[in-house]
Amino acid sequence: MKSTITEDNGWLSPNGDFHVCPFHKHKEFAKKLEYSEDTLIALGWIKFSNMYGILAPHKFATQKQIDAIWDWCQKEHLELPEWLLTDN
C-alpha cells in the first residue's frame, strides 16, 4: 500500500512513508525513533515544515520519496521544490 503525504509538517522516510508530526515537533518524532533530527536526515529522511518547505538535498532523495513529493505537489497544485528539478 502506498503512503501519501497528507500534511505539510512531518517526515518522509526513504521508503516513501509519510509520518505526520505537529508544528515544531520534528525533534520529538526523531526522539521516538531514538535518533536526532540530524541523524534522521543523514539516514535519508526528508523533513517537511510548513514554515520552511521540504528540506532535503536532491542527491539524498530516493525514487519513492521523489514520487511521493511529485504526487503531493500535483494534488495540492504546488510547485515542485527547486532541488527536485536539478540534477546533482
Image: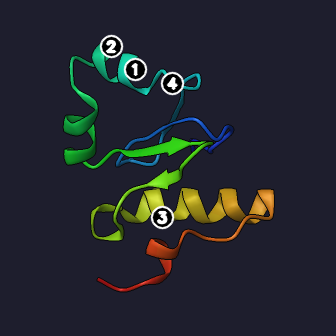
Q: Nearer the viewer, residue 60 or 57?
A: 57
| For the residues bearing labels 4 and 2, Cβ distance under 8 angstroms | no
Q: Look at 48% across and 21% down and name the residue there.
A: 25
| For the residues bearing labels 4 and 1, Cβ distance under 8 angstroms | no
Label 4 or label 1, whichever lies nearer to me, is 4
22 over 2 or under it: above or below = above
Structural crowding at the residue carrying mark 3, measured as other residues with C-alpha within 10 Å and reported as few (<14), some (14–19) or many (≥20): some
| Label 2 – label 1 distance at C-alpha | 5 Å
| For the residues bearing labels 2 and 1, Cβ distance under 8 angstroms | yes
- Residue 18 in percent (x, y) is at 52, 38
Q: Amino acid at mark 2?
A: Lys
Q: Quadrant of the N terminus?
A: top right
Label 2 or label 3, whichever lies nearer to me, is 2
- Residue 54 in percent (x, y) is at 51, 53
Q: Secondary structure at mark 1?
A: helix
| For the residues bearing labels 2 and 3, Cβ distance under 8 angstroms | no
* Residue 11, quarter of picture: top left
Pointer 1 residue = 29
Tell whether 56 sits left or right of 52. Answer: left
Please report whichever mark, 3 or 4, sits nearer to the chain's N-terminal start. Answer: 4
Pointer 3 residue = 66
Pointer 4 residue = 24
Label 4 or label 2, whichever lies nearer to me, is 4
